[in-house]
Image (cartoon, rainbow, N blue to C red):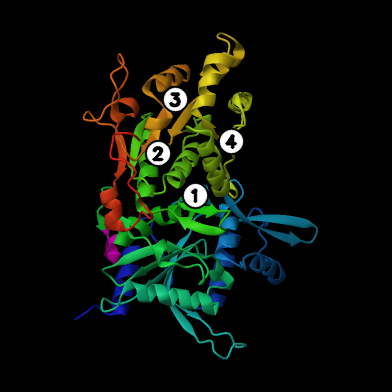
Amino acid sequence: MPELESLIEQKLIEQLIYGDSQWTYRPDLKTEADLWNNFKYILEQNNKDRLDGEPLSDSEFEQVKNQLQFSTFYKAGEWLVGENGKVMVHVQRDTKKLHLVVMNHEHIAGGSSVYEVINQYSALKDDDDAASRDRRFDVTLMINGLPMIHIELKNRQHSYMEAFNQIKKYIGEGQFRGIFSAVQMFVISNGVDTKYFSAASDTELKKEFISGWVDRNNQPVSDYIDFAKNVLKIPQAHEMIARYTVLDNEAKRLILLRPYQIHAIEAIREASRTGKSGFVWHTTGSGKTLTSYKATRNLLMDIPALDKAIFLIDRKDLDEQTNTSFSSYSQNDSIDVDNTDNVTDLKNKLKSSDRQLIVTTIQKMQILISKRLKDGTPEYNRLRGLKIAFVVDECHRAVSPATKRIIERFFGKSLWFGFTGTPRFPENPYPLMGDLPRTTEELYGACLHKYTIQNAIHDNAVLGFQVEHDGPKD
């Protein structure tokens, strides 16, 4: 006999609240009024000093509520980026402007963060719309009182796609309004098949954006309890919202990274923290530009000792294409992305005290080191002392072993992370040139994460893949 949906819901909540630093179950929160009151309480508790110990008046809280009525999920995502990692609302109290912190992304799994789970929330019908009906939401995860991740469940006799269509219908009906307009991520499951996707309007929701989860070894994680253990526990769930959601400014949509992208970024983070370099083997068409953007960006966020993070590419046309993508992703980010117009511009950006993510070409970097810097000058010594993380797209085509050695010897405190779809192994090495490295591992270090075309075909995660050549080229 198939598990009842109510039992699946109960077991999921039990998993979410199990153990330390997990979600707190709030069975008392069932209506929008309940959620607003709960949000107000958390906001006041986290801002006692800013409020001078005086609670928000009804009119002041109306100001807050007005700021949280988002017209689109993307608008909510823009706001959730925050100001230097702090998500704020602003209240006028007499002649004074109060700046209240709703969420602090530096407090993941601690500090001011409050994690609560609710179920069977009652989304009441619109009295002005005769066709609308009361709806009940299954399970919702809230951070500091705001619904962030919404979960719809079915029993095993039904497809998870029925949950997808249900969410799409609810969005079309306008159920995700008010405090629920802040949702960023949806999860759907029938117990045995569990998927996730970023929040979007009903007309923009497409099944192609639905993603399953795989572990670091690309093994599927489809059972709803296992998915909760891997993705929905703390800190992972908060990181999905704060670290692994990308705002595509050009398309005006949220992008939630796929699991293999997240595993690669986390592997780079772990390596960088121990001062190690390495490479990522991700197949063509798997979204390497997006992965490398987040990886480069997160290096600056995670490693305070780094002065710069540089994304190195080969050709000028690719430079413009990549910079356009990076600029679109970073438009609402807390990290500035700068491309380099010329070699002098590159030098000035390296000399700047700003912690920037710089997109530049290998050709400009070569000219700077070999022709524009004079050995022994203060400028030369200053640049040589920079702690830089280099992230290299198509790492074999972009940087030859000889060129990498020149740059590496100049920037003696550098880390290197290469992305490639076709690594070089002992059976397809670089041509022998003295003592220069001949394989990807010799050149960059260990393979930090692997996602091959076989994995991609199994996941249906790579769209429009084309095999262009069979040889050892990158």
Residue 281 in the image, given as x and y percentages of width and height? 32, 40
Q: Nearer the viewer, mark 2 or mark 1?
A: 2
Q: Is residue 218 rendered to the left or right of residue 101?
A: left
- Checking the image for residue 339, the label placed there is 4
Residue for badge 3: 414
Amino acid tagged 2: Arg
Marked residue nearer the N-terminal end (4 or 1): 1
| Range of residues picked out in magenta | 221-226
Residue 326: which quarter of the image? Answer: top right
Compute the Cα span from label 4 to label 1: 31 Å
Mark 4: give few (<14), some (14-19) or many (20+) Cα within 10 Å.
many
Q: Nearer the viewer, mark 3 or mark 2?
A: 3
- Quarter of the figure with the N terminus: bottom left
Secondary structure under tag 3 reads: loop
Residue for badge 2: 269
Amino acid tagged 1: His
Compute the Cα span from label 4 to label 3: 20 Å
